[in-house]
Image (cartoon, grey):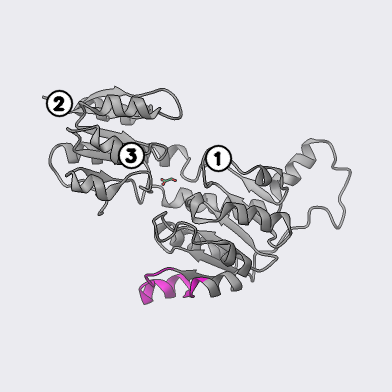
């Protein structure tokens, strides 16, 4: 008998086809957010769950699913899942690392360039018919060459962002509890620094750590105050890593030059001050959103789910 699986949101067709061949599939919702009551009710008789990062899989949801054996998250981050509790119930949790590294690093750089060169502002200006001719002082931005990039979290994505920095002529410093192996640090030309020193030294700070209890609020008000007043902050990781209210204040008061954000403390809500500031570029959490990457993520999540349901060790098992 095929296992029974709940898919929290519509998948891409290729992933749908792969999953339907291996399991009896029920779709929880067509909506962006799957109401919690639906998730809880529909999980009662399911062996597997394919979730997205917007689905909060906490104790209550897990307790409502007595047959559940695998939760396959279609994301690299698993902060939406109580992984420790799932493991105590014998439930495997999987994620989709690796396949989204390059796309996310590209987006971090898109934000760096967009903020440093004020691209959205200049685009709006041009469309509004306000371009009346070349002038020396029009939309002056920040140079990248010769500046210092500070990478917070030197995992796969942090390293991919650091690799690209060389092409822009930037030097790289990084903060991570686990220093890079010497050979990799040499290849990336990246120097480790304690976080507080990195914040004081970097011209652009880009966040690439996972959201865990240790990184929640890591860029606190005090730490943001250490950054240079002409620095730029980029966050494509998770919103709660940064004190968003303190960031908005610093930007409003000119204590930072600009910010590029793809993630927010309480998605999809965005702080009204951030929405109103011209020196902030805001994206709707699209770090991994390229056609090829999203397809690879959905397929990886489905493969993980099928492997776990077959009693095999899934390719991307998350250790609690
Ligand atoms: C996206 O934010 C992910 O964790 O994959």
Between disc 3 and disc 2, whose residue precedes?
A: 2
What is the spatial separation of the Cα atoms under label 1 and label 2, in whole angstroms?
37 Å
What residue did someone put label 2 on?
2
Q: Is residue 233 positioned above or below 97 on the image?
A: below
What residue did someone put label 1 on?
284
What residue did someone put label 3 on?
57
Along the horizontal axis of the image, is 267 left or right of 148? left
Residue 316 showing in the rendered view = no
Q: Is residue 148 positioned above or below 66 on the image?
A: below
- Callout 1 crowding tier (Cα within 10 Å): few <14, some 14–19, many ≥20: few
Camera-near label (3 vs 1) is: 3
Report helix, strand or loop for mark 1: loop
Between disc 3 and disc 1, whose residue precedes?
A: 3
Rendering quarter of residue 284: top right
What is the spatial separation of the Cα atoms under label 3 and label 2, in whole angstroms?
24 Å
Along the horizontal axis of the image, is 42 left or right of 30? left
Along the horizontal axis of the image, is 280 left or right of 299? right
Indicate the position of residue 9 as horizontal and vertical percent values.
38, 28
Magenta region, residue range: 176-195
Indicate the position of residue 224 as horizontal and vertical percent values.
60, 64
Question: How many dots with numbers?
Answer: 3
The quadrant of the image that shows the C terminus is bottom left
Rendering quarter of residue 229: bottom right
- Callout 3 crowding tier (Cα within 10 Å): few <14, some 14–19, many ≥20: many
Report helix, strand or loop for mark 2: loop
Q: Is residue 95 magenta?
A: no
């Amino acid at each position: 008998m095929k296992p029974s699986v709940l898919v929290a949101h519509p998948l891409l067709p290729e992933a749908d086809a792969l999953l339907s061949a291996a399991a009896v599939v029920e779709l929880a919702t067509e909506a962006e957010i799957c109401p919690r009551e639906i998730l809880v009710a529909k999980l009662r008789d399911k062996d597997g769950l394919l979730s997205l990062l917007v689905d909060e899989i906490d104790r209550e949801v897990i307790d409502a699913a007595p047959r559940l054996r695998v939760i396959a998250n279609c994301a690299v981050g698993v902060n939406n899942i109580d992984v420790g509790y799932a493991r105590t119930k014998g439930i495997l949790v999987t994620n989709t690392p690796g396949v989204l590294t390059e796309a996310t690093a590209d987006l971090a750089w898109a934000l760096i360039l967009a903020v440093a060169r004020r691209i959205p502002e200049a685009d709006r200006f041009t469309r509004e018919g306000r371009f009346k001719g070349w002038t020396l002082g029009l939309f002056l931005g920040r140079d990248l060459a010769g500046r210092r990039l500070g990478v917070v979290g030197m995992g796969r994505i942090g390293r991919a962002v650091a690799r690209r920095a060389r092409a822009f002529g930037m030097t790289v410093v990084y903060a991570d509890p686990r220093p890079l192996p010497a050979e990799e640090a040499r290849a990336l030309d990246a120097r480790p620094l304690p976080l507080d020193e990195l914040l004081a030294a970097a011209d652009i700070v880009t966040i690439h750590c996972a959201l865990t209890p240790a990184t929640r609020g890591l860029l606190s008000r005090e730490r943001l105050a250490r950054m240079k007043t002409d620095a730029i902050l980029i966050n494509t990781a998770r919103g709660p890593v940064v004190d968003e209210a303190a960031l908005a204040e610093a930007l409003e008061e000119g204590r930072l030059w600009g910010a590029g954000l793809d993630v927010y403390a309480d998605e999809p809500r965005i702080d009204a001050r951030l929405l109103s500031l011209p020196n902030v570029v805001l994206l709707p959490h699209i770090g991994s959103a390229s056609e090829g990457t999203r397809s690879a993520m959905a397929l990886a999540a489905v493969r993980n789910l099928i492997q776990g349901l077959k009693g095999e060790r899934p390719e991307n098992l998350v250790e609690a």
